[in-house]
Amino acid sequence: MLLQPDLYKSLSSLCFCLQVNFVVCQLCALISAFWFRLFLHPSKTSPFIRHVVATLLGLYFALFCFGWYALHFLVQSGLTYGIMILTGVEHMHKYCLLVALTYLSLCQITRVYVFDYAMYSADFTGPMMVITQKITSLAFEIHDGMARKEEHLTAGQKILAIRRMPSLLEYFSYNCNFMGILAGPTCSYNDYIAFIEGDPRRHRDQEGATSPAVVRKVATSFFCLLVFLSVCKVFPVERNIDDNFIANTPFYAQVVYLYLSMVTTRPKYYFVWTLADAINNAAGFGFNGYDSDGSPRWDLISNLRILNIEFATSFKVFLDNWNIQTAHWLKRVCYERCPYHPTAATFILSAMWHGAYPGYYLTFLTGIVITLAARAVRHNVRPYFLQSPTHKVVYDVITWAATQIAICYTVVPFVLLSVGPSLKFYRSWYFSLHIGCVLLAVALPVKPRHLRLKEQQKSSLQESSQHHLEGTVSNCSQKEKTT
């Protein structure tokens, strides 16, 4: 019994050291990014040197932060590159998805069930999750560019398609560069190569506009860190399942506390993702054109939009602005390519990618039901509230509150991690949102996605035929007048 407190203290101190190492490495990466942009600019340095330096710096930061566990990054990338070379472009995307996800899952299971179950923060599988996204995205983009016909690709797939096999150096640079190895975000291979090579067709290096964007994002990230450190212990999530709290607190107060306890966990993610975005911007990566007022946009690979998250009026809007690059990855790899039940398949893939904690699966299975219900309400109820501005405001207020509570209800298992505490929370709410969402999804039908797509295609064909007919009639009339 005396060993348990000592073991707990050792694990706590180890976890704290990992967090400190992570922050220190990200700050060093920020400084390195400025140096990389100023002294290894594409106009001064060859792409080969930029690839080598970006890769070596990334591996150094990974070793400093995670020790020899960082070798898993090289093993996972090496295995999948071998698959790309040996299996050919026809089926390699399937094999790469299977191998990369399996390797990631084995590492996650080992970390959870062999090592400490609750050592959640700053573990080495976090960077592997981003590398898995990059590996699989790259494999699908190569498949699109080298194995599929142009007319079979969507507009987005045509832009992302890769027409040649990357070299080994390009591949490791894309996966392990210092700007994104610790916290991402994921980016497309074509955008990354354009940044490294300074391709003027796809990349614009805005020297004067970079610094304000970086300063703003760094300030935002550290403000979020201060908020998290100030309030995270004031509203612990675990209190939602405390017996005394459940027995003695009115239900409306439980709802308010649930919202406060979950909102105060978000600034941690805001800090990590905003700082990661700033690092890429500091290196000159992330420029995405200009706003309508002419100001430069540095959101090409941004991972979140904080105000859109906090004021989201639908489940979809929340998900579209939270972990944006992961949402893009899930859409491109799964949702767009899955012929049946793409929503369920996408949530299941997301759960597998996140890790081995049972709470993740409870969250994403709940997310399927709530997404279907939210879609049904939006399709069937929203049109009635668009008839006047006042009705629209009322609708937005109601849907904001419903969305925020639904999100909090959904992600409680994501924070609690275990099955027992998660089910205890849902039982305290009598599984009310599960039951309500199932009833809404059944009572308010929405046409399947493939039928909606067929209707859209049919409508567009009819419109084009109508325009063509009108043009023909107009030409005939013009000829008659001329004659």
Image: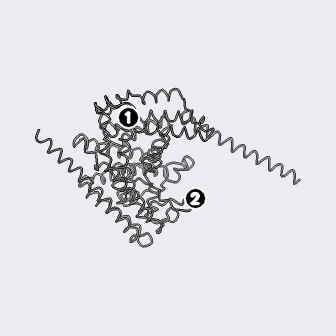
Q: Amino acid at mark 2?
A: Ser
Position above or below: 43 against 416: below
Marker count (numbered): 2
Quick one: 310 or 474, which is closer to the camera? 310
Quick one: 313 or 441, which is closer to the camera? 313
Q: Name the image quarter holding residue 246.
A: top left
Mark 2 sits on what residue? 292
Q: Earlier in the sequence, mark 2 or mark 1?
A: 1
Left or right: where 455 falls relative to 18: right
Quick one: 200 or 169, which is closer to the camera? 200
Q: Looking at the image, which residue is at 49% across and 63% down?
A: 203
Label pair 2/1, CB-CB below 8 angstroms: no
Give the SS element for disc 1. helix
Q: Amino acid at mark 1?
A: Ala
Per the rendering, the mark at residue 253 is: 1
Position above or below: 322 against 430: below
Residue farthest toward the right in the current orientation of the protein:
483
Is residue 65 at all visible to an observer of this figure? yes
Give the SS element for disc 2. loop
Give how far across and how far down residue 272 sits, in percent: 36, 53
Q: Name the image quarter holding residue 469.
A: top right
Give how far across and how far down residue 77 sits, in percent: 34, 52
Residue neighbourhood size for the residue with mark 1, other residues' Cα within 10 Å, grouped as few (<14), some (14–19), many (≥20): few
Q: Looking at the image, which residue is at 14% across and 41% down?
A: 4
Give how far across and how far down residue 172 sits, in percent: 36, 58
Q: Name the image quarter holding residue 7.
A: top left
Left or right: where 82 falls relative to 163: left
Residue neighbourhood size for the residue with mark 2, other residues' Cα within 10 Å, grouped as few (<14), some (14–19), many (≥20): few
Is residue 49 at all visible to an observer of this figure? no
Give how far across and how far down residue 372 sits, in percent: 48, 34
In three-dimensional space, the C-alpha distance between marks 2 and 1, rounded to whole angstroms, equals 44 Å
